[in-house]
Image (cartoon, helix red, strand yellow):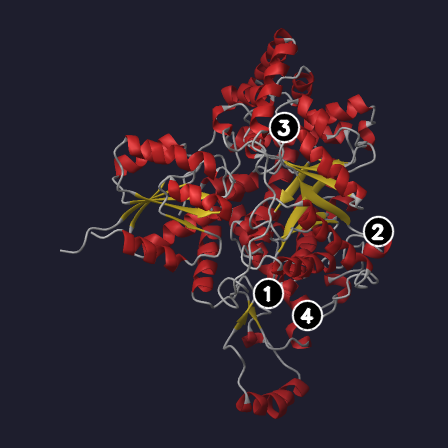
Amino acid sequence: MSESRRGNTQTVAPSEASSAQREPSQKEKAWEQNTLGPTLEKSPERQREFTTLSDHKIRRLYTKADLPNFDADRDLGLPGEPPYARGIHATMHRGRLWTMRQFAGFGTAEDTNQRFRYLLAQGQTGLSTAFDLPTLMGYDSDHPLSEGEVGKCGVAISSLADMEVLFDQIPLANVTTSMTINSPAAIIWAMYLAVAEKQGADWKKLSGTLQNDILKEYIAQKEYIYPPEPSMRLVIDTFEFAVKNTPKFNPISISGYHIREAGSTAIQELAFTLRDGLEYVEWGIRRGMDVDEFVPQLSFFFNAHSDFFEEIAKYRAARRIWHKAMVERYGSKNPRSWALRFHTQTAGCSLTAQQPYNNVVRTALQALAAVLGGTQSLHTNSLDEAWALPTEFAATIALRTQQIIAHETGVTNTVDPLGGSYFVEALTNEIERGAWDYIEKIDAMGGMVAAVERGYPQREIAEASYRYQRELDKKEKIMVGVNDFVSEEKPLDTLQIDDTVAHRQAERLAKLRAERSNDEVQRRLNALRKAAEGQENLMPYLFDAVKSYATLGELCDAMRAVFGTYEEVAIT
Amino acid sequence: MPDKKIRVLIAKPGLDGHDRGAKIIARALRDAGMEVIYTGLRQTPEMIASAAVQEDVDVIGLSILSGAHNTLCPQLMSLLHDKGMNDVTVLVGGIIPEADIPALKQSGIAEIFLPGTSTQDIVDFIHKRVIH
């Protein structure tokens, strides 16, 4: 591998963190002696060592000694220009606010359609769909394994008939829609495109995002069906289809969110996500696409956890790494491939079941970090989500939190207000360096699919997650209301999922199977199975089959028969 | 002779794949000197009950975050009963609404640990409950 591919970046001076190489100015040295020294003698600091939430060491003070080779033009650039440290648009949130996109879904398609229309009426600017576990795992609502899970963690979608209800009276040509689905993403997307077609919407104008990030499923969230190879084929099929048919739709949202929720550090979240991104790029190129043909449609999704500056530095580093990788590894010529666009969600795992109203405050601060980090869209969690899916009351406060940041705080008045801060720039450098180290390690293993098969990222995350739990148990890290500042409070009223959902879904499926042409369904399922055995792009076959009202379970089973299923080796 | 180690089966029933909690508990109990078997993901109540018999465990720890506890827990308890495993201590950890707790305990679940529980509390509970 050539030196340039190894990612030794000119924007990073390695080991800037180590104080051995740090050369403070005369003035700083004098300050240490005359001002700092006496202060420490009189009143020592609260802790011997200060670290971020991810255990990254933080110095007492950052000065220009922490940025020895700093060149603002080269390392930061200007907004909308490489290396995009200051954001991907020239005017950032002065020009256009981020999309306020609240993730919602529960019960039946009717229930969620009502919540969607409520959120749009409240000023939300994009939709985001949560599916229930049977849908995520490719089972119909009436499958035995779906028992007890229908409509619980999201909306139950078993066929195009459900999808038509989900988006009833929502004009898909005008609303951007995100769909959080992975293993069966191509099928759900085919259903979405079929609804758009029925509404008479022009596919070329459709805008939205499919999560469709199977690699982070093997790494963290574990909602996989097929083995990596055929799963990656399906992902690349959606890339090809999107390039030709839906130029404004993101066929993937390469996600660090779930990696972080599984307990990773900020650096691991960044590194594994971007390495996943590079893996998709390599598979796309191997399929025969030009890098600049499909990469502009790839989008990202990060977590916003509680360590304010660590998160901001993470987003800034992400943009710099992506730009560098696109230019140096893949010879990209198109600036649209260089600019990393991302959605952010505040950290679900930071929410506490105890004293739940404190979660409003946590979420507001996390959202602020995402905004200062230059996010393109944002979901803010609701205060009751450590207990259940949110009530309408809680979801409204979460949306209002974004509106307050956007319209009251003034943080959107200037682009990248933290740019040039000694601390933020030094931390951005350190996080970037840490991420490149991981990326290079995974390169050496032969890429992310190979690393996943060895359990490497899974093991790194499990280690970090256990370390954090021990720190909580020992009170080295504090969660307010959980391991300190504990008080009694009365329970919240939470959203109850109506117990009739599974029954109503089963009835609807029975009716569907009775009314559709089952011969036609079989014919199209057979065509899909046959295509799956070959090399063709499966999107047209999926699109064809969903329009005959073949169910999600039937489609997934047809591919299970060809691809097999995946079982992980559990790491504890 | 040292005491026989307490044997624990940690299981993830249902379709959910969020295994952070299950893995932390498995490791914490192992660090506390117990013998821990982790089933891996997506175990049906039948698979969990069979594994419990086969591994002759003292404790079963179920991690459930998906809201499917009211379906999965009673199924497991009745299967354990059918297999004559009436002495096994069954614990649940995860997101369980407080309103559901009495019925789960009624079905034979020994304790329910909610988010924010320290691993030491779980270790202590097991030590108190399972005496060799």
Q: Which numbered mark, 3 or 4, is in the foreground of this view?
A: 3
Mark 3 residue type: Ile
Residue A8 in percent (x, y) is at 61, 57
Disc 4 to disc 1, C-alpha distance: 10 Å
Which callout, 2 or 3, points to the residue nearer the camera? Answer: 3
Mark 4 or mark 1: name the one nearer the start of the chain: 1
- Between A401 and A507, the one lying in front of the other is A507
- Which quarter of the picture shows residue A51? bottom right
Q: Nearer the viewer, mark 3 or mark 1?
A: 3
Q: Which of the numbered marks, if any, corresponds to residue A157?
A: 3
Q: Nearer the viewer, mark 2 or mark 1?
A: 2
Earlier residue among tags 2 and 1: 1
Badge 4 amino acid: Asn
User: Residue A298 placed where, x, y %?
Assistant: 70, 40
Q: Residues within 10 Å of mark 3 (few under 14, many from 20)?
A: many
Q: CA distance from mark 2 to mark 1?
A: 36 Å
Secondary structure found at label 1: loop
Q: Which residue is mark 2?
A: A96
Amino acid carrying label 1: it is Pro
Residue that badge 1 annotates: A14
